Image (cartoon, rainbow, N blue to C red):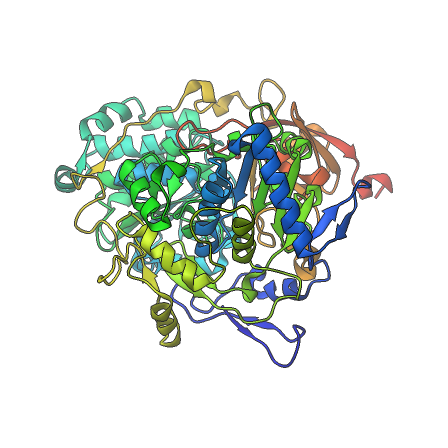
Amino acid sequence: MTLTVAGPGLCSVEVSGRDFPTNQGGLCRKGWSSAELLKHPDRVREPLLKNDDGEHRPISWDRALGLIRDRVVSTRARYGADAVGVFGGGGLTNEKAYLLGKFARLALGTSRIDYNGRFCMSSAAAAGNRAFGLDRGLPFPVTDLGSARTILMLGSNTADTMPPFVQHLQGARDAGGLIVVDPRRSATAELTSEGRGRHLQPAPKTDLALLLGITHVVVMEGLVDQSYVRRRTSGYDDIVRGVAPWWPERVASVTGVPARLIRETAHRLAEPGGTYILTGRGVEQHANGTDTATAAINLALLLGLPGTTGSGYGTLTGQGNGQGGREHGQKADQLPGYRKITDPAARKHVAGVWGVPESLIPGPGLPAVELLGSLGQHGGVRCLFVHGANVAVSAPNASTVLEGLRSLDFLVVCDFFLSETAAEADLVLPVLQWAEEEGTMTNLEGRILRRRAAVSPPPGARSELWIMARLAELLEAPSSFSDDPETVFTELRAASAGGLADYSGVDYAMLDAELLDGGAGAYWPYPAGSAGTPRLFLDSFAHADGRAVLHPVAPSSSSGSVSVPGSVSAAGFTAGGTLTLTTGRLLEHYQSGAQTRRVGDLVATSSEQALQIHPGTAAGLGILDGAEVEVSNERGTVRAVARLSAAVRPDTVFLSFHFPGAGNANVLTSSETDPVSGMPEFKTTRVSVRVHRPASSEVVGV
């Protein structure tokens, strides 16, 4: 993306797409309209303190920082250091994510730090580490996809969420080999029409069974790349035993996907000519998301795809810095360079870079859902810092999270708008937007990119690096805390050296030169003296023996993963009269919508929560298109406008997660989490639907 500024002020800022390999000059609607946010009248421009009347009023930076220091000191004295918590975000630059982890552990002295990537990439990351010994979203350049003959996409609607990505699917579409797995006939699933591929439409949360069925065919019908499996993997016999019970007819009864399509998919994936398997949040945001992603990796390994030129497996990162944000220390169990916080050698290395005794680095903290569940509780977090997240809308079981935020002794939110979470804060600190700051980001391919400041921020806004550096000084923290992005990045390089995500061979001068020369950035791992690693695993995987691990997985009947769609009536109801709610993104909006709901062109297209429901199901409930409906379960109620569409299964309804208040879909979602990754169960929720207010045509008798 390039940004043009002509003349004084921000009124003439223009955004255009840069001709870069990943997007080839394209942007989505959110990118084209992003400059509007820089001059938006809702911008927070000075620190805001909530008074006794509940209103936020401006205060000075000196008073704001002094107040934070006093509350942190008093909280630690009364409850202990772990009563102070930090919640970060996958949109932070690498520098901010790195310093936030250091700030939490050394300046605050707490182990209680995690981030919203736990809601996004954690299951894919856990599965990648389990199988390969390393997690990088795409272990190959995204441009490699263009030569593929077959691409299997599981649970990703890139046509809406990342429109420029679609061009990389064109080769597979032209070959009739784009296979999309999604309970909805999404915009991405529509790309398979007219002979461009096939759409598999399983019941929600049966993706694991579907993958086991495809793998069963691969194993039992002689499609395994036996040479690859012998040379490069371990655990094959366990996989054979594990998939034996999942023959296609049984899987069809569980998923609703015809056995014929299961067999055809397996054979298509095994054909020569380049095959890729890609996963997204739709199959990962489940209480069995790690196992589902693992099943996709198992299938890819049996076909000999990972670490093979022209084929591969990858997962699609969702947030702006979703890859880099999970590498350098803002996760509960992690130190910079993708090091485990429980690893003595990792702790020693990072302590040396920070110049502190290893004993000062706390141990692992709590993953996001547990962290948020502890807010205001006995032995839990009493004082919370939030950076780059809007948990009041984005967290599961949002009503309980909101109660937790309100029960805190002190809540500090760093944001540039008064988001729903910031509105609950005792203190809001105004920070910089994307075009106002220096730093680096790491994209879904592991490509490290420079972010350059293009405009000046409002006078009262401050970089989060500056905020952390000043607070560290006031709290008399050990080690040094710089507010200069390049200095922080230099320290990050040293802290990551020798880790899985090694950035030690990269510096700003290199990245700036790459940018000026039209280069493509630098792929980690990039040890000093190397040329980086665009393609991982070509020679070996990251486990000690160099082999990938085939890890057997199976659905759990207690999770509902093996429920039979045959129990659904013609009108779409289960025996209990409920439907399955799944959630996701819209083309016009991003994450909690705190930014995109402030852009006029985007709101004009999508201004309110809408429930996508099958016409047959709606008829059984007496719902007409345009009616206001209530979607309810034991956790709460959401109001939405009914939109009838045959794109959704009769047993399923769909809400986006971009709207707050009465339209907040996460009021309904559960706090149940994946036992390995800590990922919440976002995609499968039992609900009932009823008419709240008839459609306007009914009222006027049209």
Residue 58, image x, y percentages: 75, 54
Residue 548: percent from left, percent from top: 22, 39
- In this view, 123 is above or below 329: above
Residue 336 percent coordinates (x, y): 37, 47
**Near-viewer residue (533 or 383):** 383
> Viewer-proximal residue, 532 or 28?
532
Q: In the shown orientation, is residue 46 left or right of residue 545?
A: right
Left or right relative to 611: residue 379: left
**Is 131 above or below relative to 430?**
above
Q: In which quadrant is the C terminus drawn?
A: top right
Q: Is residue 456 left or right of residue 99?
A: right
Residue furthest out toward the right = 700
- Whether residue 138 is visible, yes or no, is no
> Quick one: 277 or 616, which is closer to the camera?
277
- Seen at 46% across and 35% down, the residue is 111
Q: In this view of the protein, can residue 27 be seen by the observer?
A: yes
**Residue 260 at x, y percent in the picture:** 35, 34
Residue 105 figure quarter: top left
**Residue farthest to the bottom?**
7
- Quadrant for residue 295, please give it: top left
Residue lying at 64% horizontally and 40% vertically, measured from the top left:
411
Q: How many marks?
A: 0
Where 393 sits versus 522, above or below?
above
Residue for point 59% across, 73% down? 14
Look at 63% across and 50% down and name the residue there.
65
